[in-house]
Each structure stands twice: as C-alpha cells, then as structure tokens.
Amino acid sequence: MAQSITFVSRRYTTRSLWSLFLMCAFPLHVWTITLVLRDVSWVAERTNVWDAIGVGAYGLLFTFIESCAVFLVFALLGLILPSKWTADKRISFLILLVMILSIWGIISQLLFLWNINLPPFLIQLLARSGRPLVGLYLISLALVVPSVILPVFQFIRSSRMEKVLLDFVDRLSPLVMTYLVLDAAGLIVVLIRNFS
C-alpha cells in the first residue's frame, strides 16, 4: 500500500491533481451551462420556472459526476507517462489532451444540434465504396489525428507551452470554482425536488 502511494506521489502533487480536476470540469461545465441557458426558456414556457431550474440542476449534477469520471481516467493515464516528467509537465500534458478531447466532443454535439450532415455527393461516394463505415472512420481520423498530434508534438518540443497551460489553469481556477458552487446548488435543488 505504501509503495503505491509513493508511486502516485512521485508523479503528482495535491495541487497538480486539483488543477487537473478543475480543467476536466471546465469545458464540461461551460458546455452544460450553455445548453441549459439555451433550453431554459422553452422548458419554463412549457411547464414552469421551477421545472426549468430542475433541468439545469440535474444537468449540473450529471456534469459534476462526468467531470469526476474524466478526471479519474486522465489521472490514471498520467501514471503511464514518463516518470522523468515533473508533476507540472505531466499535468500540463494531460490538460492539453483534456482540452483537445473536449473541443472535439463539443464539435460533434454542435454538428448534431445544428443538423449539419455530410454533403450528398460524399454520402453517395461512401455508399458506393462498399465500406461506408470504414470511409467515415478514415475521414474522422484525417481530421482528428492532426488536431491531436500537432499540439502534442509542439508540447514535447517547447517548454513554453507548459507554462502557458499552467497560467491558463491559474486564470480559470476561480471561474471553475464558481461552477463547482453551482454544482452544489444543483445538488440542493435535486434533493429538494426529490424529497419534498
């Protein structure tokens, strides 16, 4: 048990884990709050304001749970990164990956919400290929892989990027703390709605 704690403490500090959690929570909360603000007016019109607040509270509660899950995945991923990296470099790299993943997640949801589809000629081309799913995966990889590889390559080459990412975390920390306060308020609303 002591060996596993030593293994983790050599790779992370409490501050670095907290920074990673905040950056895992940031994009998820921004997106959830954006969607809640988008939907709150029509929910309030269809039912009442209390139901609209309830929808937002459930969204924030789920986002907090999702943030914890994403944090655990990335914290575990950080354990397999090179042991010679400092805690700050490890956290900066993980934050970079979290941001890239979050941006692609938001883009995929925006494409769905805005009902943006592939052009008809591309759909026909994929259908005629005999393996349309393979074609879709290849198109997706052609877009996603460079957006991951290029920032990762730049991160490995430049020590400046580590500093930029850590400054980014320091500047956003108060905002994300506000989101966590909203999560606590959301939990209170959910408890009131379920036990009253």
Image (cartoon, grey):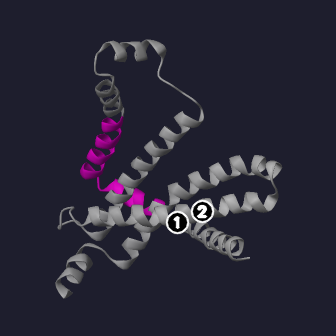
Does the magenta-highlighted stretch encompass residue 8? no
Q: Is residue 160 magenta?
A: yes
Give the Cα separation between the discs numbered 1 and 2: 6 Å
The residue drawn where x is 60% and y is 32% is 114
| Residue at far front of view | 195
Provide the secondary structure element on which disc 1 rests.
Answer: helix
Q: Where is residue 177 drawn, in percent x and y?
A: 57, 70
| Amino acid beneath label 1 | Phe
Residue 67 in sight in this render:
yes
Relative placement, left or right, of 5 versus 28 is left
Q: Label 2: how many residues lie within 10 Å, few (<14), some (14-19) or many (20+)? A: many
Circles 1 and 2: CB distance less than 8 Å? yes
Q: Main secondary structure of the magenta part?
A: helix
Near-viewer residue (48 or 120): 48
Q: Position of residue 150 (x, y in %)?
A: 30, 40
Q: Secondary structure at mark 2?
A: helix
Label placed on residue 130: none
Magenta stretch in the rendered image? 144-168
Q: Residues within 10 Å of mark 1 (few under 14, many from 20)?
A: many
> x and y percent of residue 37 in the render?
70, 51
Which three-letter amino acid code belongs to the residue tagged 2?
Answer: Leu
Give the vertical position of 146 relative to 17 (above or below): above
Question: Residue 60: which numbered mark, if any?
Answer: 2
Q: Is residue 38 above or below residue 171?
A: above
Count numbered badges in the picture: 2
Name the residue beneath numbered marker 1: 64
